[in-house]
Image (cartoon, rainbow, N blue to C red):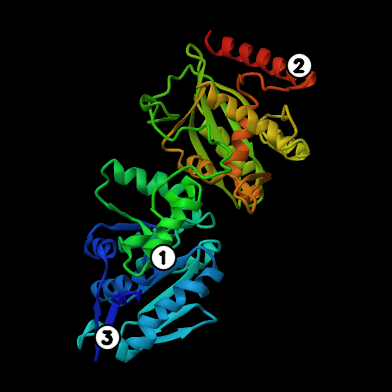
Amino acid sequence: MVATAQPPLYSVIGDEMRLHPHVGQWRAWESRKRFIFMLAGTQGGKTSFGPHWLRREVSWRGPGDYLAVTSTFPLLKLKMLPEFLTIFQHHLGLGTWNGSDRVFQFSDSGSRRTFGPDWNGEPTRVIFGSATNPESLESATAKAAWLDEVGQDDFRLESWEAILRRLSLHEGRVLGGTTIYNLGWLKHIIYDRWQRGDDEIDVIQFASNLNPAFPESEFLKAGERLPEWKYLMFYKGLFSKPAGMIYSDFIDEYRDHGGHKVRPFLIPPEWPRYGGLDFGAVNTARLMAAHDTEANVYYLYSEALTGGKTTNEHAADALDAVAGVNMATWHGGSKSESQQRMDWHAAGVYVHDPIVTDVESGIDRVIALFKTRRLYVTDTCVGVLSEMGTYSRVVDDMGDPTEKIKDKDTFHRLDALRYLAQGLDVPEAAGASSDEKLVMQAYRTDRNELVRRSMR
């Protein structure tokens, strides 16, 4: 049986380019929201659609700078850039590509054809950047941005925030396209807010086979051979919990729906506060939790991730964050980071040594708090929520999790959470050594005394 040829996304007749989008692409084309995200199955037609949207956005917003960002530079060369140059340079001849600067510069003739005879000579550029290199985005003041594979692990919250800063002056629009890979910031900041009715966000979800060029037989075979979570995420464009998630016991729903998230609330001043710190020259993470002593429940309510400061400056920020509240204890750093704790102590913040020295025991304590409904997270701690959605173990060729943590050194907030948990009244971990039990008991005694003092 001979397969019927599928219509192409676009056709070129003379100087005119006509778009022939499928239903999912058409919904993105018609959307007038500021933030448009296409969450779709693999080969659904996300990347090929992006240049057309960006071309129209340039013609609407006028001369200036625009952004095209993908997760890594190798992926840029493999997918995003060829699709872009096919439209902007090969078919339309709007300008030239400067590979050393990663900039597409509109020519005079391309600008006149885009903006009309009244074009005033102002230059127009499309600046290409990588989410793994956020500083590549910091120099531009952009009018719009096209983001490709924005859901990959390498496309972190900090990169998204850098892009928003570049767009803020012009209130620029965004088109983001991706297959779903994790439950990170894309879910918490974009998808969840869209579901709650945010009028600036539009999410368009569709499966791979909505693209008429995608073979239906391949779509069905994927459903038969893949684990359900992978099929839902990679082929249907739906969120699911991937294999290897370390904090799979965290339920990403609000407390009144059986989950671990809560909305911000006014914390009673008498509740003791606990701090967790992860030291770093480039990134220092600080988390704060409040203890409802009557219910014996903790609420993670504040987060910070900063760099480029001295220890004294970090310590001053920490003291400002707890001014006027009942500060109980600070916890942070690995066993070997005694000098950092001494420096913080000299700056006015006494940081306790860790109770346990290995990462897995710290993870166990956080999991115990979630499983026993003793720890909740306010939805304003988007950095923590994002990291929990991407914190996972490396999976082997069979799709089974290994013991190795993927990109372990990049989860600064979750490292701070592990340290913080060691200062909380954690249910005793299975297999805890006698020394660990004695140390934990000492912390509990110290903490209870602090609570009694704070309530006098």
Q: Residue at x 45, y 66 (%)?
A: 69
SS state under label 3: strand
The three-letter amino acid code for the residue at tag 1 is Gln
Mark with earlier residue (3, 1)? 3
Return the residue at label 2. 438
The three-letter amino acid code for the residue at tag 3 is Val
Query: Percent position (x, y) of residue 174?
Result: 34, 61
Query: Percent position (x, y) of residue 309?
Result: 61, 49
Query: Percent position (x, y) of residue 6?
Result: 31, 74
| Residue 109 quadrant | bottom left
Seen as rendered, the residue at the extreme front is 1
Mark with earlier residue (2, 3)? 3
From the image, state whether disc 2 or disc 3 is nearer to you: 3
Q: Residue at x 31, y 67 (%)?
A: 212
Residues under labels 3 and 1: Cα distance?
22 Å
Return the residue at label 3. 12
Would residue 142 appear left or right of 158 to someone viewing this image?
left
Tell me if mark 1 has few (under 14), some (14-19) or many (20+) residues whose alpha carbon lies within 10 angstroms of its own.
some
The three-letter amino acid code for the residue at tag 2 is Leu
Residue 183 visible in the shown view? no
SS state under label 1: loop
> Which part of the image, by quadrant, shows the N terminus?
bottom left
From the image, state whether disc 3 or disc 1 is nearer to you: 1
Would residue 201 appear left or right of 415 to someone viewing this image?
left
Residue 43, disc: 1
Query: Percent position (x, y) of residue 208?
Result: 38, 60
Please tell me whether residue 440 is drawn above or below residue 161 in the rendered image: above
Residues under labels 2 and 1: Cα distance?
56 Å
From the image, state whether disc 2 or disc 1 is nearer to you: 1
SS state under label 2: helix
